[in-house]
Image (cartoon, rainbow, N blue to C red):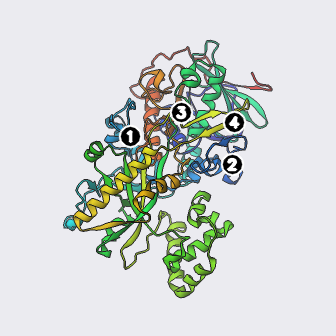
Amino acid sequence: MALISSLPNSEPGYDLCVVGAGPVGLALALEAQDRGLRVLVLEAGALDPAQSAPDWSGSTVVDPMHHAPMAQTVHTGLGGTSWLWGGRCVPFEAIDFEERSQLPSVRWPLAITDVQPWYGAAARYLGCGGAEFRRPLPAGTSSRFSLGEVELTQIERWAKQPRLVGDLGRRVVLAPSIDLLVQARVLSLLLDDDGQSVHALRVRHGGADIRVQARFFVLAGGALGNTQLLLQTQRERPTLWGGSEGPLGRYYMGHVTGSIARIVLNRPQDIAPLEFSEDPDGSYVRRRFTPNARVQHELGLLNTSFYLDNPPFHDERHRNPTLSLVFLALAIAPIGRLLVAEAMRLKHIGPGPHRYGAHIWNVLRRPWEAVAQVGDILRKRYWSKVRKPGFILRNWRGMYALVYHAEQLPNPLSRVSLRNPEGDLQVDFRFLREDAESVLKAHELLDHELRASGMGYLDYERPPELRLQQVLDQALDGFHQIGTTRMSEQPDQGVVDRNSLVHGVGRLAVASSSVFCTSGEANPTFLAVALGVRLAHHLARLLGVGPGSAPVPLQNSISNRPGSVVDTSSTP
């Protein structure tokens, strides 16, 4: 393999061209190489992440109260958006693929049995330990932890180092059958005359346009980037994917997140099983509260998880010297941006006005405690081979923020479209009242089970009549980009089939969370990588490469020189 500066004009050609060097694209490329494919990876950004900020200046977000700025949600360069990723790995479970009355007219063309075999590979690529995501409570655990319809057996796993350039990026650069071309931005898909198959990509590299050919192409450039390319293709071929009223760009989802209550543990020591813990392999895990599948069906709940956290850093009333010292560091923008992604920094410092004097006083009350605890946090989070994802400071009251992470309903009016001839995006991302209503029902269920078991109770921040609006006011995403090229059995219902191959266009697939039909309660990265690995195996069979493979006829004939590259000085 080579980190190449230009593309060869001679054989051998590429079996597969992967657009995007983020977590999904890198994992897919490595898995495809292992199956015998020769792979070219095109990355729009540079190797240096500081030189890799994508230009979204021409794109607009209709409602910035609910969708984060594009600059905070998308990153180019080797490693892609893993430069902004926290590292949380959670799989979709069986209920996420089932038909549910609370999600009418939504049907995955896959079942859990189709994706679960790929979870082990996804865990290896993401460096989060094993693929164990259900763990019984230890023998002898108090009956207080038996919460009836709410389970405490689900665990989230965390990547040992979320910035995957150090592992996956290095492996791709050293891989013998993968070429990587950076600062290569795909401008358009070039279709055959009949519009039935992709025969090349038009790519901007080194100040010129080049035409890149391969036997097959996979769009793995992130949900918004993939959708943008397909929308541009649809503009040229208006009948593709049902036209402007079809599914492409629609059903844009993320998650409903926030905190509207504190959890109060009757016995403060019960925090122990709910904290971050280290697995024998060194990765970190944490238990979550999740309503079981039966009660989700019975109550019509959207899938929801809960976990414990510290009170907001910016609220000086916590009187905690460590939280105040962390707040003060994050509030100094150049320092804060070195510590966390900008979106997380802004979340933690909260809206103004800030009471800096009160925070300084909190620190001065117990300065040595603050310095010691912050030093431990820095050591485990930034100066360790395994990055600790977070910290919870215990308190004698047993009171902690309760954070929810909930599924969002697919909504055809929540969509991405082209806003001008240049191909810039208009993002009209929407939450529904039903999303918030499900969050409230999940809280009521958890509160009931906590009280029934004697474990504790929820202490809400606002009275009942104000809680729905509180959920909607906090609803913000754009980081978890889901649904805009969703899977379907029938072409009029989605953009890709069950194997992530694009409906109606040969030699093209999509590897991204944009192919999900529902958002589940899980962060999307883990399933997106699992589906990418699954796709790599499918393409190896399709292209007749690898042990036991036989070629399957593609929709259109394959070029005699499948990997040729032709430099052009103008748009073809």
Between label 3 and label 4, give the one nearer the viewer: 3
Between 120 and 247, the one nearer to me in the picture: 247
- Name above or below for residue 391 compared with residue 258: below
Q: How many marks?
A: 4
Whole-number angstrom distance, CA of label 2 to CA of label 1: 31 Å
Specify whether residue 146 is in view.
Answer: yes
Identify which amino acid the numbered label 2 is placed on.
Ser
Which of the numbered marks, if any, corresponds to residue 292? none
Q: Which residue in the protein does label 1 denote?
A: 118
Q: Which residue in the protein does label 4 denote?
A: 424
Whole-number angstrom distance, CA of label 1 to CA of label 4: 35 Å
Specify whether residue 512 is in view.
Answer: no
Q: Tell me which residue sits at (63%, 67%) in the image.
A: 352
Which of the numbered marks, if any, corresponds to residue 250? 3
- Name above or below for residue 31 compared with residue 348: above
Between label 2 and label 4, give the one nearer the viewer: 4
Q: Which residue in the protein does label 2 denote?
A: 52
- Name above or below for residue 285 compared with residue 534: below
Q: Earlier in the sequence, mark 3 or mark 2?
A: 2
Identify which amino acid the numbered label 4 is placed on.
Asp
Q: Earlier in the sequence, mark 2 or mark 1?
A: 2
